[in-house]
Amino acid sequence: MPSVISIQNLDHYFGSGQLRKQVLFNINLEINAGEIIIMTGPSGSGKTTLLTLVGGLRASQSGSLQVLGKELCGANSKQLTEIRRSNGYIFQAHNLHGSLTAIQNVRMGLEVHPKVSPSEMLARAQAMLEAVGLGHRLHYYPDNLSGGQKQRIAIARALVSQPKIVLADEPTAALDKQSGRDVVELMQKLAKEQGCTILLVTHDNRILDIADRIIYMEDGHLVSDAYGGQSQRATAAA
Ligand SMILES: Nc1ncnc2c1ncn2[C@@H]1O[C@H](COP(=O)(O)OP(=O)(O)OP(=O)(O)O)[C@@H](O)[C@H]1O
């Protein structure tokens, strides 16, 4: 299976001069198409930094980081913008626009793709909201929806363009147990249907079982990389 994300000897530093601090140390990681990877570990261990590097949200400095065959180390801002456009993102705070309705928010996930016509954008946004169970809330504003519903809109927005990679940072942190569970199961279902790869950072132990693989980070080092969750159960059942 081809790697969609291939990381070799990746280091990362914040600051400069005497304040320069290394936060990632020699990260090596291959992620295959369609895998759901959960990245976990203590606060400050470098999870979000690694996620933002993979997403092209900050420039990679040293080593090799290839996303969909493109090298991000040494990439210029135009190349990073292209990578950013090809991914879907889901964050803890759903980052919806309060002045836009559910369907308008989801439509925004397609606006960076100029080939899609306005009417097709609306049709696809509506279909995606129906897929996340919000077909009856198309014209609601985020303020009038629950936390779980808002996060489902964020999922619809991230997946509406059918990205090959979805990056999620603490998507369940603001949700109660049941809503958190619903949200990740929905992400899992949609991602498997679309064949997309998910890289998800979380402290939420309740959702670890949705992962195909669990990566554990500590002090900037990737200290374990294990096939877990469903694949472990599948192995046990075999
Ligand atoms: N913009 C920045 N400038 C300087 N240092 C930073 C910056 N962002 C993160 N750091 C530092 O880099 C290290 C890794 O932070 P990072 O946010 O990647 O960890 P994390 O594992 O995602 O933590 P958390 O689980 O709390 O979100 C920490 O020591 C943090 O203080």
Image: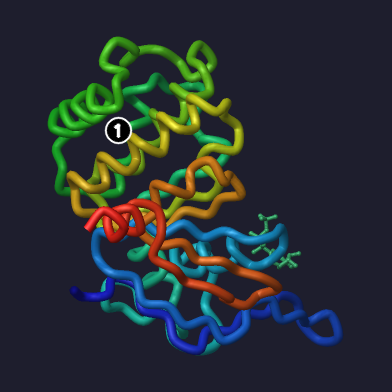
Is residue 105 or residue 175 the one in the foreground? Answer: 175
**Quarter of the image that includes the C terminus:** bottom left
Residue positioned most to the front: 237
**Quarter of the image that includes the N terminus:** bottom left
* Residue located 36% across and 78% down the image: 6
Q: Quadrant of ligand 1?
A: bottom right
In this rendering, the count of numbered labels is: 1
* Residue located 44% across and 22% down the image: 149
* Residue located 42% across and 54% down the image: 167
Q: Which residue is mark 1?
A: 107
User: Is 59 placed above or below 158 here?
Assistant: below
Q: Position of residue 121 (x, y in %)?
A: 20, 33
User: Is 133 placed above or below 158 here?
Assistant: above
Q: Is residue 142 left or right of residue 204?
A: left
Bin the neighbour count of mark 1 within 10 Å (Cα to Cα): few under 14, some 14-19, many 20 and up.
Answer: many
Q: Position of residue 191 (x, y in %)?
A: 26, 47
Is residue 148 or residue 211 the one in the foreground? Answer: 211
* Residue located 72% across and 63% down the image: 44
Residue 177 visible, this orientation: yes
Q: Quadrant of residue 143?
A: top right
